[in-house]
Amino acid sequence: MNNYDDLDFLNDYEDNLNEENPGQNIEDRLNKDSDKFENIKLDSESLEEIVNFYYDEFHYDKALKYINILLQYYPYSSEGYHKKALILDGLGKFEEALYCFEKALLLNPKDSEIFINQGITLENCGKYKLAIQSYKYALELEPDNADALFNLGLSLEKIESFSEAVECFNEVINLEPNYKDAYYELGYSYDFLDLLNDSVKAYEMHLKLSPLNYNAWYNKGIVLNRQGKFLKAVDSYETCLAVKENFSPAWYNCGNAYAAAGRLHKAIECYENALKIKKEDAYSLHNIGNAFEELNEYEKAIDYFSRAIEIEPNNFDSYYGRGNCYYNIHKYNESLDDFNSALVLCKDYSELWYSKADAEIALGKTDEALKSYEMVVKLEPKDSDAWYDYGYALLNSKKNYEALAAFENAIKNNRSWVEPYYEKAKIYFLLGEIENGVSILNIAFELNPSDKFSFDFNKDWKRVLDFLMKR
């Protein structure tokens, strides 16, 4: 074979590029000079150099061409098949890459690095359990290999074995205290395990080593928000945005944190910034609607909910929010329409049925309201407020015995609440069941002594009924 000694231009591409053609892309230069490699017989060292050059520059197709030439001369080279596997992985040809890893391991079964890279490719094609086995083989060869432990932890995260992943990342840190990515993944796994304080500490350790990682600032904010530390979460999101201003999820979640802290105008600013980056963001529009609803600016809220519905017509929350706003400005027909639209999308949300019942009462649709209340108590049988309101609607519909049963259910779920007792007493008196009425009224007076007064119902019945009717 002939030596191709003049390979200096390969090594000097990047150095000479700016001098010769300051604006020229390295890829253009490689394409232009690729004919220098055609039809040239190269020795193994030269071929390896060319393969590595193209591989390092991400020109995997050209690297593949020359690794194939190299393997023609050295068909039993474990390193050659290992390199070819890495190149094929870069091209997204994972199954071919795995075949080459297997050939490399047949030739050299004691190389832990091959097992590690095989595991990475197995991860890339979603074969996480096989990847775990590959990393474990690497660790049998090198128990203190931090990269094998780290990648094992990543695969364990993928199959949601977070406790085992935490063990791996902690082992990595014991071996290499400055292994910054291990702290990052440790924070992620602790978050899933609901070990939120540990998660925050892990992210903080990562950020000491990598202070410009906007994803770490963002994830730390997520965890702080889950802890209810909303303004601290805001600080993390804002630091994330100082590093990467156009990161829409950080603006959105910063808005959520401000909203949770009650700073609604700041929340709206954040959601608006998210919308500048992602204009068709139904969730930001919806949350602005929520903020304006809380500020009692119902017309503005309706506008944002409507825009959210245009983008995401299957989000029942936006119909529900808009329906509540219509209700608050006494547009009960529009309100009822929205509640019905929401219920088409979500039939099992008791609050929706509750709001629908309120709108129907406001429109005088008593029979429909009773059916809605019936759905509420069916979905929430232990909700004393729902039973009370259902009872009140039944009472107004002259369904006294059904109302008695509803108030009894309200009492059963909250025995210290005095109002259902008063309503039961009222019904008994109206039905002429004086003894039952007096008995229930006395229980109410025991619960609320400030209301108590002495009476003889036969003499003071008007006074008693007047007291009950005014409640």
Image: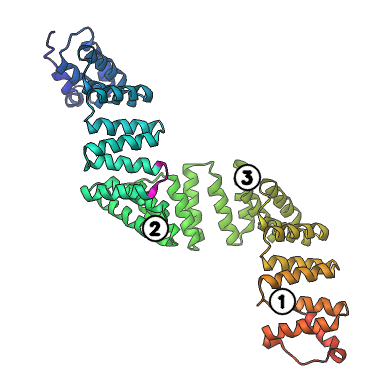
Front position in the image: 18 or 108: 108
Q: Amino acid at mark 1?
A: Glu
* Image marks 3 and 2: residues in contact by CB distance under 8 Å: no
Which circle marks residue 196 in the picture?
A: 2
Q: Is residue 161 inside the magenta stretch?
A: yes
**In terms of secondary structure, where does tag 2 sit?**
helix
Which is closer to the viewer, label 1 or label 3?
A: 1
Numbered-mark total = 3
Task: Please say if the residues under marks 1 and 3 sit with CB atoms less than 8 Å apart.
Answer: no
Q: Earlier in the sequence, mark 1 or mark 3?
A: 3
Is 310 on the left-hand or right-hand side of 265? right
Tell me the chief SS of the magenta region.
Answer: loop
Q: Is residue 445 left or right of residue 65?
A: right
In front of the other: label 3 or label 2?
A: 2
| Residue labelled with disc 1 | 419
- Residues shaded magenta: 158-162
23 or 362, nearer to the observer? 362
- Residue at 78 percent of width and 57 percent of height: 371
Q: How packed is label 1: few (under 14 Cα within 10 Å), some, or many (20 or more)? A: some
Task: Judge whether residue 106 can be spotted in this image.
Answer: yes
Quadrant housing residue 144: top left
Which image quarter is the C terminus in?
Answer: bottom right
- Expressed as whole percent of the image width and height from the top left, the position of residue 42 reads 17, 12
Q: Does any portion of residue 242 appear in the rendered image?
A: no
Q: Nearer the viewer, residue 197 or 76?
A: 76
Q: Quadrant of the N terminus?
A: top left
Say what amino acid the circle numbered 2 marks. Leu
- Residue located at (56% from left, 57% from top): 291
What residue would you read off at disc 3? 309
